[in-house]
Image: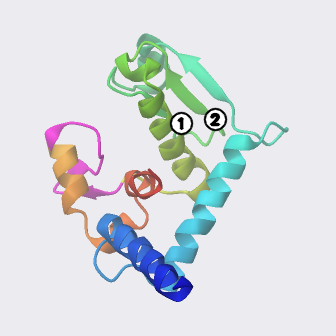
Amino acid sequence: MRRVVGRRLKNLRIRGFEKVFGEASATPENMATVAAGYEKMASALRDTGPSAAPANAMTSDQLGTKYGAPPSVLAGVPSDGSRLVVVNVTHPDFWSRKELTWAAGHEMAHLELGFKDEMINGYKAYKFGEPEERSSFDALPGQQRLVNPDHLMQEAY
C-alpha cells in the first residue's frame, strides 16, 4: 500500500512540474535545479544580515524618476547592480498579500538566480500582466520556462 501511495504522489509531482514547465521537463536534473533555486531564494528572503537585500519602498513617481519605471510596476530589481528590491507602495496591488508575495518571489529569482524575464513575440512572459504578456507566459517554450521567474513562482504556488 505504501509503495502505491508513494508512486502516486511521485506521479502527481511530476505531472504538476510538467504542467508548469512543459512536457518531459520533470527530469531529475531539472527538478533538483528548481528545488535548489527555491532554497536560494528562500534563504535570501530570510536573510537579515549584512548581505541581505533590503526592500526599498517608493511611490510610482519616485520609481519613475529614479529608474524610469512605469506606474504599472509593483516591484523590481534595479538594473544598475544594486542589491535591493524596490516596491511601489502606491500600486493598487501593494495591499494584496498574494500579489506582493508573488512579486517578492519573482524579484528574488532575478536577484539570487540571475533570471531575466523571458520574452516571446516581443512580450515579457508574465502570468499576471497585460493580455499579450499572459499570452507570452502561456506560449513560452519549456527551456525558457525553466529560467522564467513567473514560471518558477507558478510552480511554487
Mark 2: amino acid: Leu
Q: Is residue 53 left or right of residue 106?
A: right
Assess whether residue 120 is covered by the magenta stretch: yes
Q: Is residue 117 above or below residue 83?
A: below
Amino acid type at mark 1: Pro
Which mark sits nearer the N-terminus, 2 or 1?
1
Q: Secondary structure at mark 1?
A: loop
**Residue 125 rendering spot, x and y as whole percentages:** 28, 51
Quarter where residue 15 is shown: bottom left
Task: Provide the secondary structure element on which disc 2 rests.
Answer: loop
- Which residue corresponds to the image point at 44% horizontal and 51% vertical from the top-left? 153
Which residue is identified by label 1? 78
How far separated are the C-alphas under marks 2 and 1? 7 Å
Q: Residue furthest front?
A: 1
What's the residue at 47%, 55% (across, down)? 156
Q: Main secondary structure of the magenta part?
A: loop
Write down the residue under mark 2. Answer: 84
Identify the residue at horizontal 69%, vertical 47% (top origin): 44
Q: Position of residue 124 (x, y in %)?
A: 28, 49
When the figure is inspected, residue 18 is found, relative to residue 65, above or below; the finding is below
- Highlighted range, magenta: 118-131
Residue reaching furthest to the right: 50
